[in-house]
Image (spheres, rainbow, N blue to C red):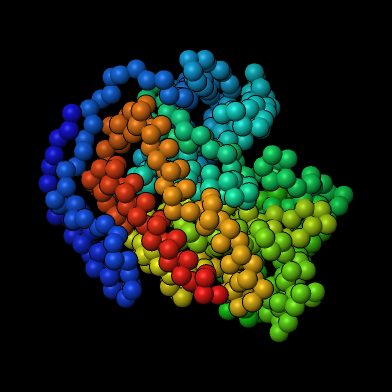
Amino acid sequence: MKHSMSYSSKTYNRFLFSTIFFITVSCHGPEKLDLTNIENEVITFYDNPVDEINFPSININTNGQEIVDDPKVNAGLVVIEDKIETNYNIGIEIRGSSSQMFPKKSYGFETKTSDFSDDLDVNLGGFPEEEDWILYGPYSDKSLIRNKLTFDLSNAIGFKASNTKFYNLFINGDSKGLYILMEKIKRDSNRVDISKNNSESVDAGYIIKIDKPTSEVGGCNTCYENSFSFRSSYDTNGNQSNDSEIYFIYDYPKPDNITDDQKQFIYSTINEFETILTSDNFDDPIEGYDKVIDVDTFIDFFIMNEIAKNPDGFRLSTYMNKDTGGKLKMGPIWDFNLAFGNVDYCDGMNPEGWIYNFNTICPSDIWQVPFWWGRLMESDSFRDKLKERWLVLRSSILSDSSITIRIDSYLEYLNENKVINQNFYRWSILGQYVWPNYFVGATHESEVNFLKDWINLRLNWMDGQINNF
């Protein structure tokens, strides 16, 4: 059953303000993007779904314990697929940063042995065996698919990202709506395939993350602590600095396990790259940046973050890795729930403009983009390789039609199983502003249509930019 109601004046005024802001910041903004006045639409509410469906589900039983941010609590997990039940023991906690304010939480969990005494590798979702997993709950992303779409596209172009799969989630019998099972980023032959690190060697496998200087070790949200991170030696303009606001977090080995010699080694690796970029011959084919970085991974990382105009891209949740004797690589990609126009700040709603120029767009934001990307875009060689890769991908996996077909396949699968109905019955947020929405659609269909239109405009704008390199 569907009911209708008029859109609240408070939410309408917010939407109207966002529309005016969008027009103001973009002198050459999109002409065909559908930003229909939601006051004239019908907001869809869903009745409690009663039809039996055969859709994969995850059922978690904490035996009355509350799931908190830390520590993990022991629980049982049952996966039901094709009417087959598989039981696991897990330790589970709430995860995320700003997303923790949402009533629909995301969770991190580890699969455990029968007595919970140790971690246990299992092949959840048909993915390669591991013990670390994530249940991501799309909330502010009312299309429900932004993260999954980006990860699937990245894997499709050969730039390894986490595998993902849709599930309905139930915790202690309470329906939590649609979730996405994801592989956690970690060193593993099937995830980040780098050598195992140990204290006996400095030139081993590393995973580093550009992010806020927060840590389970440091517990600090805005301060710098060198036990779990280090600063860049350069500011965002490429000038040497002792108080840079670019932080590199030790992700593998973890802060408790990394040695001082290993810290110095990975610092020196980053510093060598940055120092080369600041030199006059930074793009020399022998002594330039190509000597220390895997350029192909930098280009794929650039493409994936720019097609989504990811406002956190390049500056937060930005992973890098290095293998024994290898060059510095970008990736895997992470965290796209605010991408594809799903933000009402820093020009993120505008399908035009490079997001690697975030520092110019939002100079007052404390979390800034390293100077690398602007410098790399000054290199003829880098731009030529970017253009070559872009033309190949736009004629295949990243074509307008290929992306639309992929989105439609998600929707067909979810709709035929009435999962969208269930999710928005549990979380009645259609037609409501949820931070940091720019577009607020009255229906799931309008949210997806906005996403499709935005993507097409974005890709076509990038065509015009890259083809003129």
The part of the image, by quadrant, that contains residue 52 is top left
Q: Is residue 290 left or right of residue 45?
A: right
Q: Quadrant of the N terminus?
A: top left
Q: Position of residue 218 (x, y in %)?
A: 60, 53
Q: Is residue 444 left or right of residue 12?
A: right
Does residue 230 appear anywhere in the picture?
A: yes
- In depth, the one of 150 and 366 nearer the eye is 150
Outermost residue on the right side: it is 200
Identify the residue at image location x=67%, y=27%.
Answer: 120
Outermost residue on the bottom side: it is 280
Q: In the picture shown, does residue 229 fall above or below 368?
A: above
Outermost residue on the top side: it is 84
Identify the residue at image location x=62%, y=35%.
Answer: 132
Q: In the picture shown, does residue 114 fall above or below 422?
A: above
Identify the residue at image location x=70%, y=54%.
Answer: 321
Q: Quadrant of the C terminus?
A: bottom right
Identify the residue at image location x=37%, y=20%.
Answer: 53
- In depth, the one of 414 and 208 nearer the eye is 414
Q: Is residue 465 left or right of residue 248?
A: left
- In depth, the one of 259 and 394 nearer the eye is 394
Q: Position of residue 19 (x, y in %)?
A: 25, 64
Q: Position of residue 126 (x, y in %)?
A: 60, 28
Q: Position of residue 3 (x, y in %)?
A: 14, 35
Does residue 312 appear anywhere in the picture?
A: no
Q: Is residue 126 left or right of residue 413?
A: right
